[in-house]
Amino acid sequence: MHKIALLGTGLIGRFYTQSLLSYRGKDEIKVVVSQRQEEAERFAREFGISRPMTDIAAAVRDPEIDTVIIGLPNYLHKQAALLAAEAGKAVLCTKPLSVNAEDALVMLEAVEKAGVFNGYLEDLVYTPKTLKAIASARAGALGKVLWARSRETHGGPHSDWFWNKKLSGGGAIVDMGCHCIEIARAFIGKGVRPMDVTCWADTQVHPIDAEDHAIGLVRYENTAIGQFEVSWTFRGGMDLRDEVAGTEGTVWLNHWMRTGFEMFTSVGQGGYVAEKAEGDTGWLFPVGDEIGSLGYVEMFMDMFNAMDAGRQPMETFYDGYVVNAIMDACYRAAESKRWEPVDLKVWRGGESAQVATGMKDFDDQHFLIKEEVMPNGATKFILKDKNTGEISQVIRE
């Protein structure tokens, strides 16, 4: 049984609490921290937490606490993680790990020097659909992954600090690009090094300093491409989709926009519909199990089961550091309008999730480029001569 200090009472703190209270039944949130005491007290009453407070350091250093969960605004992640490392507490941090790679590396080095368990709370790689798709990819179902595209768009985040670049570290890229980048890494293989990026980012709608829309490409050492599309300008709710293409297969994942639960109401359902839903009349797409659909339950199961077993979770502070480094390169590329290198001061690589593939032989003289059945039933083979490089075709009835 773990005794938890939850730092943060916003939407993410609520989702974390709902997950923690329902999934294993043997861990307990003992302390909750909010920026305002009245908010901490209200949250504590709602979820039966005994000690509400506003002092992050006091919560982390509480002798009863063994695990710290950081659900705070981005600019506070570093401070909280360093306090947890200093206190010798296990620490789990929401995405992004920090506002930039420099601070993320400081956090990584601190928890590893202290020898404390660390987990990166990237929920969207833990959705049940995504976990099954990743397992299939690692088993070779897709062959070599060539392209992983992830899209997250909606009308903008819930809290004011997200919109303040000084507090968040950026706009839609740092808010949602972190999800998309890590999803692509999970499919392409975490042992495959991200080399460079190109990115377009702009502020199209909102009167803010940060970008509210961005598209980026991340090129990996094995020539695979990770693509992200993120926006705070999308109308109609939240659109979460992933597409993964490999030499032997394809995966399409649609997580959110159409949830499988469709309801029409002319008068409104009288309250919350789903995260980022824009209204409560007309055609609605509620969610039966929001925290389960978004990966929170599987994420915390992995974190605490790994902690109990003395192993690393699927997502660690190191993964968060790599994602921060890629996002830093995206911001440089958006400014320079050029491909920019990913500056990883620490690269650990590891075993790639890719399946070794090569040219397919047609016969001793030719490689097979493509095989297809024609409308008349004949089979066409597009070939390349192994010696001359000449492209030809053979049709067999």
Image (spheres, grey):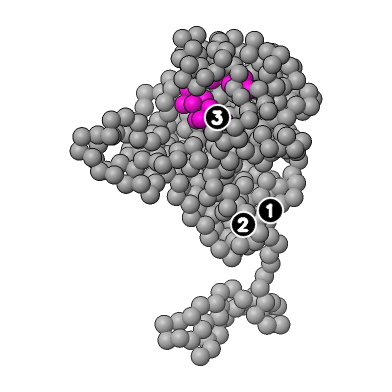
Q: Quadrant of residue 103?
A: top right
Identify the residue at horizontal 62%, vertical 38% (top origin).
Answer: 301
Residue 164 coordinates in the image, percent (x, y): 46, 20
Residue 62 coordinates in the image, percent (x, y): 68, 13
Q: Magenta stretch mostly in which secondary structure?
A: helix
Identify the residue at horizontal 59%, vertical 61% (top origin).
Answer: 142
- Name above or below for residue 4 compared with residue 148: above
The amino acid sitting under disc 1 is Ala
Mark 2 highlights which residue?
137
Mark 1 highlights which residue?
353
Mark 3 or mark 2, whichever is nearer to me? 3
Q: Which mark is residue 385?
A: none
What range is drawn magenta here? 4-21
Q: Quadrant of residue 303?
A: top right
The amino acid sitting under disc 3 is Leu
Q: Nearer the viewer, residue 93 or 296?
A: 296
Residue 328 coordinates in the image, percent (x, y): 59, 32
Mark 3 highlights which residue?
21
3D distance between C-alphas at marks 3 and 1:
34 Å
